[in-house]
Amino acid sequence: MAQPNKVYQPLPLRTESDVEQEVQQNILVTSVDQVLNWARSSSLWPCMFGLACCAMEMIATATPRYDIARFGAEIFRASPRQADLLIVPGTVTWKMAPAVRRIWLQMPEPKWALAMGGCAIMGGPFAYAYSVTPGVNTLLPVDVYVPGCPPRPESLLTGLMLLQDKIKKDTIGKGWVRRDVEPQFQRYLPEGDPIRKELESLWPPYIDYDRPPQGDAFGDR
Ligand code: SF4
């Protein structure tokens, strides 16, 4: 049997207030800076790297009790090429300095560094020892310092949150400036020292190593 033609009712015309309500519910206005900074600060991938006792506290931060995953930073990468956060947990000896600097250089930009514990900040209990650097800031630019010997996992998490705040203040308007520190090792390592030679190869070739380093031993001007 033939079906009668269906009569469709025209859709009701939307009023201006309907459209306004729809727009309010479905459009999010933000800036590129905010989106980018939110993405970067919420997905920091630390380098899987430890130097001494502080590294145990860093490992504890990744356990369920402290759960660094709450901050999106639980993906510790075994390759520096896939990491954008270098947590330096422990004593940085001169022997280890070229390795630390090399790991930093292998990380892609943008990247950040966090010095964890007294040793990484200024030598800790080994300060002024012939074999220990006076802080990892002599090798690479540090964004956040987390003091303690060792700092507890809560302190590391506080440092991480401070770093997130710092990242949120970035703007792409000024572009990403590659940061570096002036070499300081000439103060501590004699000429001809094999570690000094290795470190020289890890700074840009235009640096004049015969020129006395600028600022005091802590890099302040
Ligand atoms: S700061 Fe203390 S706990 Fe951390 S590496 Fe140095 S000695 Fe060990």
Image: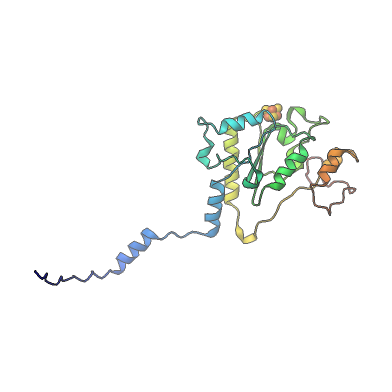
Type of colouring: rainbow
Q: Position of residue 218 (x, y in %)?
A: 78, 40
How many numbered callouts?
0
Q: Outermost residue, left direction?
A: 1
Q: Quadrant of residue 135?
A: top right
Q: Nearer the viewer, residue 104 or 78?
A: 78
Q: Position of residue 94 (x, y in %)?
A: 80, 35
Q: Quadrant of residue 154?
A: top right
- Residue appearing at x 52%, y 55% in the figure: 35
In the rendered image, the vertical position of residue 161 relative to residue 39, given as above or below: above
Q: Position of residue 214 (x, y in %)?
A: 83, 47
Q: Quadrant of ligand 1?
A: top right
Tell whether 5 sits left or right of 138.
left
**In this view of the protein, can residue 141 be seen by the observer?**
no
In the rendered image, the vertical position of residue 24 relative to residue 215, given as above or below: below
Q: Position of residue 42 (x, y in %)?
A: 53, 46
- Residue appearing at x 31%, y 69% in the figure: 16
- Residue appearing at x 65%, y 28% in the figure: 150
- Residue appearing at x 59%, y 44% in the figure: 45
Q: Nearer the viewer, residue 35 or 166?
A: 35
Image quarter where the N terminus lies is bottom left
Tell whether 175 sits left or right of 126.
left
**In this view of the protein, can residue 36 be seen by the observer?**
yes
